[in-house]
Amino acid sequence: MPTRNITMPFPARLRTELQIDPVLLALALALLLGGFVILASASITISDNAVGRPFYYVERQLIAAVIGGGAGLVCLFTPMRVWLSLSPLLLLVGIALLLVVLVPGIGHEVNGSKRWVRVGILNLQVSEPARLCLLIYLAGYVVRRHLALRERFVGFLRPMFVLSLACALLLAEPDFGAAVVLLATALTMLFVAGARIRDFALFFSIALIGTAVLTLTSPYRMKRLTGFLDPWADPFDSGFQLTQSLIAIGRGEWFGVGLGDGVQKLFYLPEAHTDFVFAVFAEEFGLIGTSALIVLFCAMLWRIFRLAIRASQAERLFEAYLAIGLGTWFGLQAFINIGVNMGLLPTKGLTLPLVSYGRSSLIIAMIAIAMLLRIHHELVVDAKPVNRKRGSKR
């Protein structure tokens, strides 16, 4: 019997140890590879003009993908119980990242926003890893304090205090879009975890009033809001970016003008390779292409939420809440980015996950996908209800 175990074929053992969700992986890879194609088209003229290298941004994005792939592999082989045990520490890491970027001499300022910290060859946008850390913490919190969250206001107040602090730090950068995504994702997780509706109503009212005050008392936010409502009223200033985006989308018609043949990316559309890459994609691939892209995102979200349901049914609550949080994050950010490009929402500096140029965003997105693949692996290999006795603290 011992010899039989020693001589077991390696491939069979590998199949037992690692079970990858092929559908989720294929969808993520399709978005990633498609993103490289449209990034090359959207940035070739900009990068050639700026640094004399047509594929400058593609090369930098490729380096980020390699880093994200390496970090993702580490996460793929890290048991979820490790993340659960580290969740309180990750809260401190997330808050520390949001604080350090505001320290003079450390935070790197671009276009009036101090959102980046230099880490080696990478300008790290701290909101991306901080958001992941905070979502892991929140998933751990709702497991540990499940009954308190459902029955007592203080159980809801604790995570809201932490999230309010994080949002305040994001607004100090300022990064209004990241604050909105973080808060909406966290509220979704708490709602699914069973937080009381009256607690939600109270906090939502306070958040709504606070958002209105911030918008009305900040000239640049008010300018963005009015520009979004009627971009054609000032098409050469506040409405310039949106009008150029709408022109690009309109030029695409049904089937697009063809890959590489778009003209709006030629110095007409600002941030064509980052926040407005969807408009370039729409111009070159048309309604059919953009519909296919949206279907890919919807399919990935369906797969992620299906994974969350399976984890919940297996009573792996930490994994279920984390999957809900990551899926909501991806879906909300994609919705906002596409909505901004189409003039449905005010302009926000949010990338299209796995598609837009943004190295910090890409690395963290790949890590998040790897964690979802790890959840799938553990459900297939060992679906014991490991969280059944957790959540009894009041």
Image: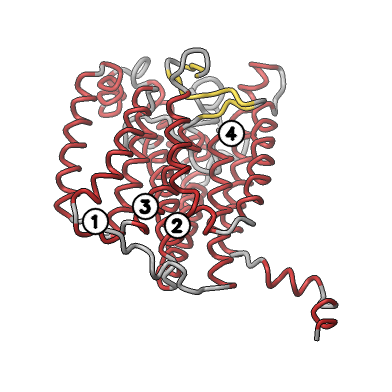
CA neighbours of label 3 inside 10 A, class few (<14), some (14 to 19), many (20+): many
Where in the figure is residue 244, as x and y percent of width and height? 43, 26
Residue pointed to by mark 2: 323
CB atoms of marks 1 and 2 within 8 Å: no
Seen in the picture, residue 150 relative to 87 is either above or below; the reply is below
Where in the figure is residue 208, as x and y percent of width and height? 19, 36
Look at discs 4 and 2 and give the one toward the viewer: 2
* Amino acid type at mark 3: Tyr
Quarter of the image with the C terminus is bottom left
Residue pointed to by mark 1: 195
Quarter of the image with the N terminus is bottom right
Q: Is mark 3 on a helix, strand or loop?
A: helix
Look at discs 1 and 2 and give the one toward the viewer: 1
Query: Residue visible at 72% across and 22% down?
Result: 53
CB atoms of marks 4 and 3 within 8 Å: no
- Numbered tag placed on residue 359 in the rendering: 4
Q: Is residue 300 visible?
A: yes
* Amino acid type at mark 2: Ala
Would residue 280 be found to the left or right of residue 73 on screen?
left
Q: Earlier in the sequence, mark 1 or mark 4?
A: 1
Q: Earlier in the sequence, mark 2 or mark 3?
A: 3
Q: Which of marks 1 and 2 is nearer the N terminus?
A: 1
Would residue 289 be found to the left or right of residue 193 on screen?
right
Q: Which of marks 4 and 3 is nearer the N terminus?
A: 3
Residue pointed to by mark 3: 141
